Amino acid sequence: MTAEQVEKYIREDLGMTPRHDCHALAMAITDISLDMDHDECELMYLLLENRPIDAIHTHSYGFHTANGRGIIERIKNYYYEYESAS
């Protein structure tokens, strides 16, 4: 995933202006995707839209499961590492 893809998604699909470092976000999503062997786009949707990922049980009755919260926290940790390195 590239920073341009993340920025385009935020601007065009969500209709918002990115407030965070899209490069660090793309790198964090890619790393989690590789760690988990899961689709990058679905992980981005989970983080940015709170869209459930049924295959990895991120939500139950509309709320985050422990797994969903853990994935989001891992993405955030990677993001902050990359953001501080820039």
Image (tube, rainbow, N blue to C red):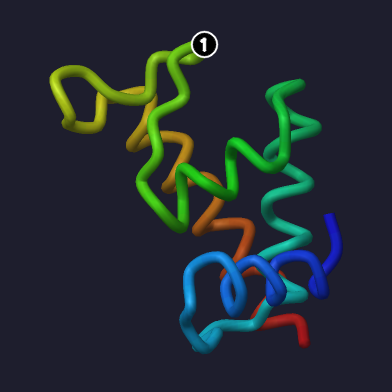
Which residue is rendered at x = 76% and y = 45% of the image?
31
43 on left or right of 7: left
Q: Amino acid at mark 1?
A: Ala
Which residue is rendered at x = 48% and y = 68% of the image?
14
How packed mark 1 is, by other alpha carbons closer than 10 Å (few <14, some 14-19, many 20 or more), is: few
Residue 82 sits in quarter: bottom right
Which residue is rendered at x = 39% and y = 30% of the image?
52
Q: Nearer the viewer, residue 36 or 81?
A: 36
Give the residue at the far top of this rendering.
55
As drawn, 3 above or below 51: below
**Residue 65, percent across and down?**
26, 24
- Is the N terminus in the top left, top right, bottom left or bottom right quadrant? bottom right
- Is the C terminus in the top left, top right, bottom left or bottom right quadrant? bottom right
11 on left or right of 41: left
Which residue is rendered at x = 77% and y = 75% of the image?
23
* Residue that badge 1 annotates: 55
**Residue 69, percent across and down?**
33, 37
